[in-house]
């Protein structure tokens, strides 16, 4: 079968790499892809938001399965466009991707179906929002309803900060229409865990847990980023936590979406907070995480083509997921200055060190070939260096050794990815 993957980051590199191991994958294309992806797939210069062009490509090239990695095209309805044209595609339709696309929607869903999450109120009126902030508990969390590149969440430690935050979102419209509706939410404390799952509309199969590191600097300082590294499994995701989430969160979410006439097919990424009152949902994403994918898929034993097809066909109940006992750690090599401004086009070297190793991976995010055919930086997050080990400590030590193999002038990373492992 010919397969098209939509996206061009570390997540899509990992998906392409995993798909390439399937005997069913005859040829893999990736649009737009990146330098590393071109080792396992043919990169096609079509943007992820060019739905009609992507569907034309799928039709003209006899693509039997399209896999959408990124949030924006899913929220924008790429799956509906492909389905209308009779093309097989993995991912939620627009009316289900709203679980990520609208915070107000996901909060209402959780309230209606009794899924544990932080208490909240939704506002479309600036005055009413400010009135509420005068008496609510502090700290408080403000969330722009719509997508804001992961930056639409403001954690406010004082009332003044919260008032300024409302101005930023609703008056100055820093995130445009995404901030016209705002969720004001109770501040929760605890450890965060990411859990990825496959869903076929009715059945849900949990992949492995992972822990992300969202801040740019060591010690969880600095600005929020897309993720600077992570590890899997999370030692804090115990059997007890898993049992609670299976009873109160996972299946309930899938059933809720079906009951709302929005059956979800694809990946649900549960962002959980393990609070003193038990696990609660921080957020849902309608796709694989990045870099969660870089630590979860290398541990997965199943044929990924089979799993994608079962989700599309509604036969996921016939599949049991299997994961290796090995642990994985991913350290992101970023460009100095990320997530603000950074240089692009910086030449990189050292990739050959990863060849032929099956416990070290160099997943590309922001990379491309320059006119001379050299691999150069092309984004904020540049590479995800992943290693497998017999336990988390070994995987972490190996991942950090491998971060030395790659050289580029603007290389930046956190040095404490997985530090929490020592506290487990
Ligand atoms: P979200 O995009 O909703 O996951 O929010 C981004 C980050 O903000 C989360 O990963 C948490 O670290 C933090 N956050 C979001 N909501 C809350 C909350 N209610 N209490 C504490 N921290 C939160
Ligand atoms: N690493 C967080 C995300 O993919 O949203």
Image (cartoon, rainbow, N blue to C red):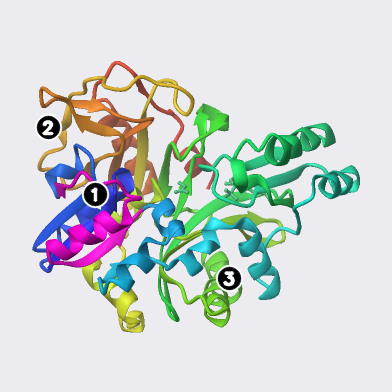
Please name the residue that numbered disc 1 is placed on.
31
Q: Residue at x 16, y 31 (%)?
A: 351
Please name the residue that numbered disc 3 is placed on.
249
Q: Position of residue 199 (x, y in %)?
A: 41, 72
Q: Residues within 10 Å of mark 1 (few under 14, many from 20)?
A: many
Left or right: residue 352 compared with residue 277? left
Q: Position of residue 132 (x, y in %)?
A: 86, 49
Q: Separation of disc 2 and disc 3 at Cα?
A: 44 Å
Q: Secondary structure at mark 3?
A: helix
Q: Is residue 207 above or below residue 183?
A: below
Q: Is residue 252 above or below residue 363?
A: below
Q: Residues within 10 Å of mark 2 (few under 14, many from 20)?
A: few
Q: Secondary structure at mark 1?
A: strand
Please name the residue that numbered disc 2 is placed on.
352
Q: Separation of disc 2 and disc 1 at Cα?
A: 25 Å
Q: Residues within 10 Å of mark 3 (few under 14, many from 20)?
A: many
**In this rendering, does residue 320 appear at all?**
no
Q: Secondary structure at mark 2?
A: helix
Q: Residue at x 48, y 53 (%)?
A: 235
Foreground of the two, 236 or 348: 348
Left or right: residue 314 compared with residue 201? left
Residue 243, picture quadrant: bottom right
Q: Position of residue 326 (x, y in %)?
A: 31, 54
């Amino acid at each position: 079968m010919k397969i098209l993957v939509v996206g061009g980051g570390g997540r899509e590199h990992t998906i392409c790499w995993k798909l390439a191991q399937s005997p069913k994958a005859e040829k893999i294309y990736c649009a737009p892809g990146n330098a590393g992806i071109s080792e396992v797939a043919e990169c096609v210069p079509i943007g992820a938001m060019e739905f009609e062009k992507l569907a034309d490509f799928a039709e003209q090239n006899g693509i039997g399965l399209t896999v959408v990695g990124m949030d924006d095209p899913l929220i924008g309805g790429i799956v509906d466009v492909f389905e209308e044209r009779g093309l097989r595609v993995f991912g939620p339709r627009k009316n289900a991707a709203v679980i990520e696309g609208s915070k107000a929607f996901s909060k209402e869903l959780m309230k209606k179906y009794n899924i544990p999450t932080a208490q909240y109120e939704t506002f479309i009126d600036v005055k009413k929002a400010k009135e509420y902030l005068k008496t609510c508990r502090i700290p408080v969390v403000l969330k722009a309803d719509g997508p804001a590149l992961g930056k639409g969440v403001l954690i406010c430690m004082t009332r003044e900060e919260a008032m300024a935050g409302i101005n930023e979102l609703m008056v100055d419209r820093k995130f445009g229409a995404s901030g016209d509706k705002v969720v004001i939410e109770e501040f929760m404390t605890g450890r965060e865990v990411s859990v990825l799952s496959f869903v076929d509309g009715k059945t849900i199969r949990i992949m492995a847990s992972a822990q992300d590191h969202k801040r740019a600097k060591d010690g969880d300082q600095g600005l929020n980023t897309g993720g600077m590294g992570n590890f899997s499994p999370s030692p804090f995701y115990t059997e007890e936590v898993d049992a609670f989430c299976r009873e109160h969160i996972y299946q309930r979410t899938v059933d809720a979406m079906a009951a709302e006439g929005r059956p979800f097919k694809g990946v649900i990424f549960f962002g959980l907070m393990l609070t003193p009152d038990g696990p609660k949902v921080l957020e849902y994403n309608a796709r694989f995480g990045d870099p969660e994918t870089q630590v979860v898929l290398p541990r997965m034993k199943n044929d990924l083509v089979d799993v994608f097809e079962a989700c599309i066909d509604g036969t996921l109940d016939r599949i049991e997921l299997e994961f290796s006992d090995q642990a994985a750690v991913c350290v992101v090599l970023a460009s100095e200055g990320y997530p603000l401004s950074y240089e692009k086009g910086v030449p990189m070297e050292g990739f050959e060190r990863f060849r032929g190793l099956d416990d070290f991976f160099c997943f590309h995010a922001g990379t491309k070939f320059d006119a001379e055919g050299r691999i150069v930086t092309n984004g904020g997050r540049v590479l995800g260096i992943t290693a497998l080990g017999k336990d988390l400590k070994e995987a972490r030590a190996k991942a950090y050794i491998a971060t030395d193999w790659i050289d580029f002038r603007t290389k930046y990373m956190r040095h404490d990815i997985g530090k929490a492992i020592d506290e487990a």
